[in-house]
Every structure is written in C-alpha cells, then in structure tokens.
Image (tube, helix red, strand yellow):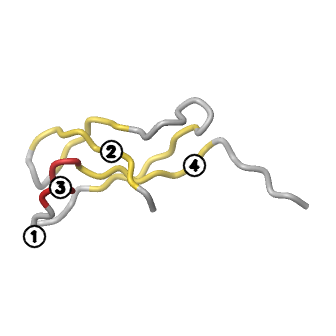
Amino acid sequence: MAKRKDARVTVILECNSCGLKKVSTGISRYITQKNRHNTPNRLELRKFCPYCYKHMIHGEIKK
C-alpha cells in the first residue's frame, strides 16, 4: 500500500539574526506546523527571540 503525503508538515523556525551570527549564547528555534498545499514556500513569522531580547523574523529551515 502506498503512503499518501499529508498536507500538514512539521517545520522548524530559526531566528534569522541569531542563525547568521552563530553567537555562543544560542539560537532561538520554534516548532510549528504548516499546510503544504496552502503555503508551498518557506514560512517566515515574527516571533520573540530570547537571545536578541526582541521580536525578530524566524524563517523555516531544513531538518
């Protein structure tokens, strides 16, 4: 039996500024879900980064 691809997939969001700097304090990451059919592109959301101490854009990364 063939497995069908689910529309909902789990994605990891990483802070764009912390991810680029690779600071020693850490990298802010969030786990969320998205609908693959409605949002085929990479997801970007404004979330709070505890290492930058402000709301930053978090982008989807590969697992």
User: Relative to residue 25, is residue 10 drawn left or right?
Assistant: right
Residue drawn at 21 percent across, 56 percent down: 19
Local secondary structure at mark 3? helix
Q: Earlier in the sequence, mark 4 or mark 2?
A: 4
Apparent side of residue 50 relative to residue 8 in the rendered image (left or right):
left
The residue under label 2 is 59
| Earlier residue among tags 4 and 3 | 4
Q: The N terminus appears in which quarter of the rendering? A: bottom right
Quadrant for the C terminus, please.
bottom left
Q: Which residue is mark 1?
A: 24
Which numbered tag is attached to residue 9? 4
Look at 54% across and 36% down and name the residue there.
Answer: 40
* Mark 4 vs mark 2: in front: 2
Q: Which mark is residue 20?
A: 3
Instruction: Name the amino acid type tagged 3.
Output: Leu
Instruction: Name above or below for residue 15 compared with residue 22.
Output: above
User: Is 3 placed above or below 8 here?
Assistant: below
Mark toward the viewer: 4 or 3: 3
